[in-house]
Amino acid sequence: MSYPKSKLVLRMGPKNKYFKDRVTELSGENVDLCFQCGACSSGCPMTQEMDYLPSKIIRMVQLGLEEALESKTIWVCTTCFNCEVSCPRGIDIANVMEALRQLVLRKKYNRVSLDDLSPEELRDLPQIAIVSNQRKLTA
C-alpha cells in the first residue's frame, strides 16, 4: 500500500528559530524531547478551560509558532506540575508556560531606555529602582 506524498513542508525560518530558542533559554527546557504522547494533557486538571492542550502548546513551541503567545492556555496553567510528573521525558511544562507568559509581558516593554528619562528623574530615582527596571523589563 502506498500513501500519497504530502505537499506540506515545514521549514523553520530565522524568526521561528529565534522564538523557539528564546523559550528554551527562558524556561531551561528542551522542548524537542517531547514526542507528543499527550500524558501532560491527560494529567492536567485545567484542560476544560484551555483553548489548546498543553501538548499542543509544546508542539507550537517546537515549530517556533508565536501563536502560542496568543493562547488562553498559558494563562490558565496553574503550575500544579501534574504535567511534569506524568511526562515520560521529564519536561517541566510549567516552566515553558511561565516562559511564554514572560514573553507576552515583555512584548510591551522589550527595551527600556534611560535616555527617555529627564536628568531630574534620573537624579531622583533610587539606583536600585533603575537597576531593577533594567533587569525586569529588558528582554
Image (cartoon, rainbow, N blue to C red):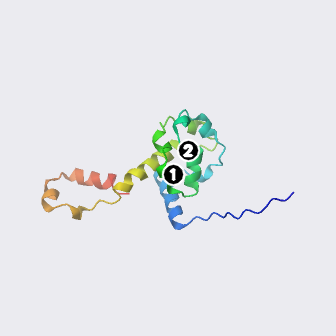
Q: Within 10 Å of the Cα at label 2, are there few (<14), some (14-19), or many (20+) other Cα atoms?
A: some
Is 86 in front, or is 62? 62
Residue found 18% across the figure and 51% down from its top: 126
**Which amino acid, mark 1?**
Ala
In the picture, the quarter occupied by the N terminus is bottom right
In the rendered structure, are the residues bearing label 2 and label 1 in contact, judged by CB atoms less than 8 Å apart? yes
Identify the residue position indicated by label 1 in the image. 68
Is 68 in front, or is 31? 68
Q: CA–CA distance between discs 2 and 1? A: 9 Å
Identify the residue position indicated by label 2 in the image. 52
Which residue appears farthest toward the bottom when viewing the image?
14
Residue 113, percent from left and from top: 27, 62
Residue found 55% across the figure and 48% down from its top: 57
Q: Looking at the image, how many numbered discs can be counted on the residues? A: 2
In the picture, the quarter occupied by the C terminus is bottom left
State whether residue 123 is above or below residue 84: below
Relative placement, left or right, of 4 versus 125 is right
Is 19 in front, or is 76? 76
Relative placement, left or right, of 13 versus 38 is left
